[in-house]
Amino acid sequence: MKNHFNNLKRYFRAGLTLFVLGGLAACGGNDKKDMAEDTAAVRTEKTGRFAGTASAIDGTRMYTDFAATDYFTGWDANNDNMLNKEEFATSFFSTWDTNGDNTLDKSEWSTAANDFGFKDNPNWDWAAWDNNKDNKLSMNEFNTQLAKAQLFENWDKNNNNLLDQREYADGLHTMWNEADADGTLNEEEYKGKFNKYYDSSQKRMMPERG
């Protein structure tokens, strides 16, 4: 009987020890979790952003914002709600011509080429595009080289030799994503580029043709 009682005491002590150790481990895990959450809260408070990966801008957001402007309508010279190759070239030229003087200087070119992801692309070398070496690009020079780059063909997903507004926005979205270092366009990057090139309050003059 005495031996049985001693065995019960040993079992009780062992069980109590395991219970205490388990409780301590659980508390430690919760403390670590709470510490991580507190750190995230501090980071959020300091940066003014939600902790974690910044939300990426999707194609629908790009299309919605772009369609709210009247740029596409302004480029559509024949009013067919589509852009042909010439109108497409006009859209790029007028967007990049930020001072509205109907030419692109090297500064405008370099800034836009970097923003749109062409900085290290051999098809977008300034020297090749500036055919007459006057340190600026006319609309004709731009049209000639843009056709060689085949950007229009890449954006024309249904191969009808025309771009509708969704194809244009989707092409722009893909380009800006690829231009970003991490391949993802976040809110801050998106707003910076969109406001620079497609802000409705900053109307671009349509370049003279010819």
Image (spheres, helix red, strand yellow):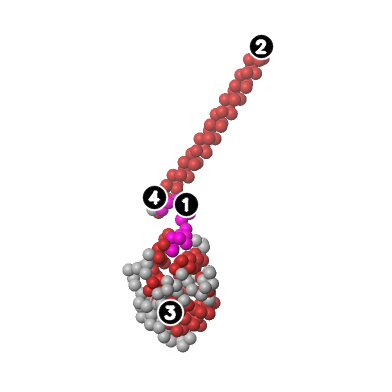
Q: Earlier in the sequence, mark 3 or mark 1?
A: 1
Residue at 38% of width from left, 80% of height from top?
Answer: 207
Say which quadrant the C terminus sits in.
bottom left
Crowding at dot 3, Cα within 10 Å, few <14 / some 14-19 / many 20+, comes out as some
Name the residue: 47% across, 81% down: 143
Q: Is residue 119 above or below residue 185?
A: below
Q: Is there a contact, CB below 8 Å, between mark 4 and mark 1?
A: no
Counting other residues with Cα less than 10 Å from the Cα at mark 1, is it few (<14), some (14-19), or many (20 or more)? few
For the residues carrying marks 2 and 3, which lies nearer the camera in this image? 3
Kind of residue at disc 4: Glu
| Residue 119 in sight | no
Q: Which tag is nearer the camera, tag 2 or tag 4? A: 4
Q: Under tag 4, what secondary structure?
A: helix
To which residue does mark 3 refer? 106
The image position of residue 80, as x and y in percent, is: 42, 74
Q: Judge depth for marks 4 and 3 and give the one in front.
A: 3
CA–CA distance in space, label 2 to label 1? 63 Å
Label 2, label 3: how far apart the Cα atoms are: 100 Å
Looking at the image, can residue 17 be seen?
yes
> Is 57 included in the stretch rendered in magenta?
yes
User: The residue under label 1 is which amino acid type?
Assistant: Gly
Disc 4 to disc 3, C-alpha distance: 41 Å
The furthest residue to the top: 1
User: Which mark is drawn over residue 52?
Assistant: 1
Give the crowd class for mark 2: few <14, some 14-19, many >=20 residues within 10 Å: few
Residue drawn at the location 35% of the way across and 68% of the way down: 200
Region of the chain picked out in magenta, as a range: 49-63
- Residue under label 4, please give it: 45
